[in-house]
Amino acid sequence: MTLNLSYTLQSCKSSLATYLVTGSNRGIGLEYCRQLNQRGDQVIATCRASSSELDALGVRVETGVEVSSGESVLSLMKKLEGVHIDVLIQNAGIAEFNSLSNLDPESVIRQFEVNALSPLCFTKAFLRNLGKGSKVALMTSRMGSIDDNTSGGSYGYRMSKVALCMVGKSLSIDLKPNGISVAILHPGLVSTRMTGFTQNGITPKQSVNGLLARIDSLTLENSGTFWHSNGETLPW
Ligand SMILES: NC(=O)c1ccc[n+]([C@@H]2O[C@H](COP(=O)([O-])OP(=O)(O)OC[C@H]3O[C@@H](n4cnc5c(N)ncnc54)[C@H](OP(=O)(O)O)[C@@H]3O)[C@@H](O)[C@H]2O)c1
């Protein structure tokens, strides 16, 4: 009887974890919200503007969240005062493919700001909502792997994602004493607006299946690992 009760309490606890997802109105972010909601987790979906697909899920949606704006992040901090977050999924990102012949420094800076600096500042801003056992998931890309770079180009995107990998590694070290673990995740090549809905990619559903398996298996021991959604460990 005692064992059954403790099992029930444990399953209640795990099924009621609270996940905050940035960039949740479409693509991979939307699919995170869909699968988390389906499995009974609490979702705080943040986005600049919602979508009919996100609204249809019936989860908590916080609009007006521009991850690179201090004012916008501050406003969200106020709304989430006292809310415990179990998993912070920083998914919002942009890709502007600058080649060497078409280099646009402003575009490079913009990608660096949204893809690398904002997730670092966002994590710092919401540290007070995290606690022992909380997790941070950073959506980086295999294009942020130096070892794996065999095709060159994409300066701004590659630079921003390699910086995000470094953010994740340092956070995994700095947050370990607080009992917070960090996953550095590549979703695979996924058919979303970012990739022009490529036919060569996997679906957001397939990708998020794998990504959630990685986040579920994240511990303080394997914190700071760079994973493909399929479970493969990627080289830096
Ligand atoms: N798709 C892939 O194959 C692939 C591969 C490797 C890594 N990734 C990474 O996975 C993540 C999700 O990609 P995706 O394919 O789902 O892309 P997507 O379909 O283009 O969606 C990007 C999401 O990020 C949001 N966003 C962009 N800039 C933002 C900002 N400044 N503030 C707040 N939200 C912002 C977008 O919101 P709006 O609708 O308001 O623009 C949208 O919700 C990204 O970090 C991406 O780099 C994707």
Image (cartoon, rainbow, N blue to C red):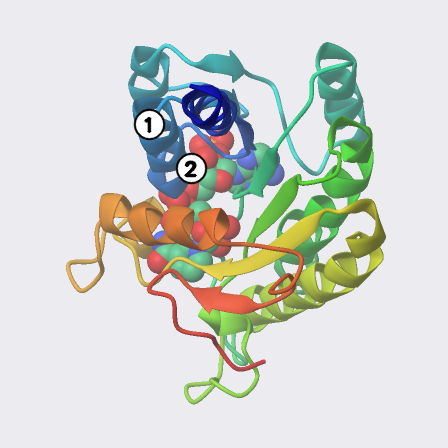
Q: Which residue is mark 2?
A: 29
What is the CA distance from the residue labelled 1 to the residue labelled 2? Answer: 16 Å
Q: Is residue 118 above or below residue 40?
A: below
Residue 4 is left or right of residue 79, and the answer is left
Mark drawn on residue 127? none
Residue 227 is left or right of residue 123, and the answer is left
**Which of the two labelled residues, at mark 1 and mark 2, occupies the earlier sequence position?**
2
- Pointer 1 and pointer 2: residues touching (CB < 8 Å)? no
Secondary structure of the residue carrying numbered label 2: helix
Total labels drawn: 2
Camera-nearest label, 1 or 2: 1
Residue shown at 50% from the left, 34% from the top: 23
Residue 210 is left or right of residue 148, and the answer is left
Most distant residue in the front direction: 1
State which quadrant residue 136 falls in: top right
Task: Locate residue 228, reporting x and y percent.
Answer: 41, 66
Residue shown at 34% from the left, 46% from the top: 208
Residue shown at 15% from the left, 58% from the top: 199
Which residue is nearer to you in this view: 13 or 128?
Answer: 13
Task: Locate residue 150, reporting x and y percent.
Answer: 43, 89
Task: Locate residue 88, reporting x and y percent.
Answer: 61, 37
Confirm whether residue 98 shows in the render.
Answer: no
Residue type, mark 2 in image: Gly
Q: Which residue is mark 1?
A: 39
Q: Is residue 13 above or below residue 109?
A: above
Q: Is mark 2 within 8 Å of ligand 1?
A: yes
Q: Looking at the figure, which quarter contains the N terminus? A: top left
Q: Is residue 85 above or below residue 139?
A: above
